[in-house]
Amino acid sequence: MTQFDAISTANLVPTPELVERLIEEKPRCWSWAAFVSVLFQRWAAVEERKVRQVLGARSPTGPHLNTGHAVKEFVSRHMRDCDDLTKQCHALLADPSFRDAFGAPDDESTADAAGIVRAANRVGDFYVRFLELAEECQRCSVPEQYTEFMDDCTRWMNLPLHDFGEFLNDVLMAFEELQRRVALGERYIRLDPVSLPMTTDDQLIWSIMDRLRAIN
């Protein structure tokens, strides 16, 4: 096959309306193009907030936690929520129904457009909630002796935001590989499973846990 025989494939699109058109027209790779497009649209919609969150300083405009007990309850709840979100996101991406939504490897006509968009939006919802949890940590007001502790908690809550950026890069690379292989004429293509990477900072988390236990 020469370069002039290459098969055209779907590309990412920047708006929900163009996703709908993509689904209607169904060019090659449309299913993954729709998934990645929705993900990037959801990511782009809150990118300014994410940048402010990651690069900004503490801005105690949220609730005031007056006591050590209130600080402990707040941090414990947010860490549980973050852990639950991570598990839910992993479960979604590992569920066979997620892969099934993209149809058979050699027959994209069997893909479920509504299921693909729904899955992408669910992942987008997880990302927005990760961001909200981190913002809540950064905005809460605490007694002076807990300021450094809350700064560390905010650093911990920011980690999933970085992980999600890595996930987007992984998904984009997988999509580009799919485009390349389809353009070369391959028909039976099964992509490797996508998963949310997890950044671990053992020193940070154990420091947070030790200080949590020390709060009466």
Image: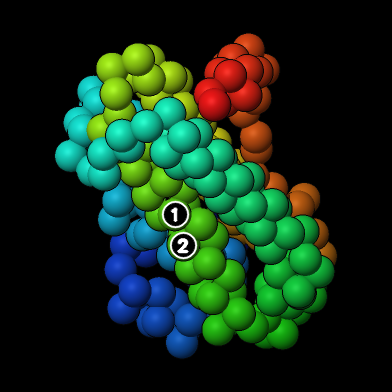
Question: How far from the left and from the top, in percent, is residue 31?
Answer: 58, 71
Name above or below for residue 76 compared with residue 183: above
Residue 40 placement (x, y as % from top left)? 41, 55
- Tell me what residue is drawn at x 69 percent, y 52 percent: 87
- Name the residue that disc number 2 marks: 125
Tag 2: amino acid: Asp
Residue 24, how many percent across, how many down? 46, 87
For the rendered model, the colour scheme is rainbow
- Asked whether residue 157 appears in the rendered view, the answer is no
Q: Would you place residue 30 above or below residue 181 in this image?
A: below
Image depth: mark 1 or mark 2 in front: 1
Which residue shows up at 23% across the image and 43% down it?
62
Q: Quadrant of the C terminus?
A: top right
Q: Residue at x 43, y 19 (%)?
A: 149
- Is 138 located above or below residue 205 in the figure? below
Q: Is 112 located above or below residue 92 in the figure?
A: below
Q: Of the numbered discs in the image, which one, if any, rests on residue 129? A: 1
Q: x, y percentage for residue 2?
A: 62, 52
Callout 1 amino acid: Arg
Place residue 70 in its image quadrant: top left
> Callout 1 environment at 10 Å: few (<14), some (14 to 19), or many (20+)?
some
Pick the quarter of the image with the N terminus: bottom right
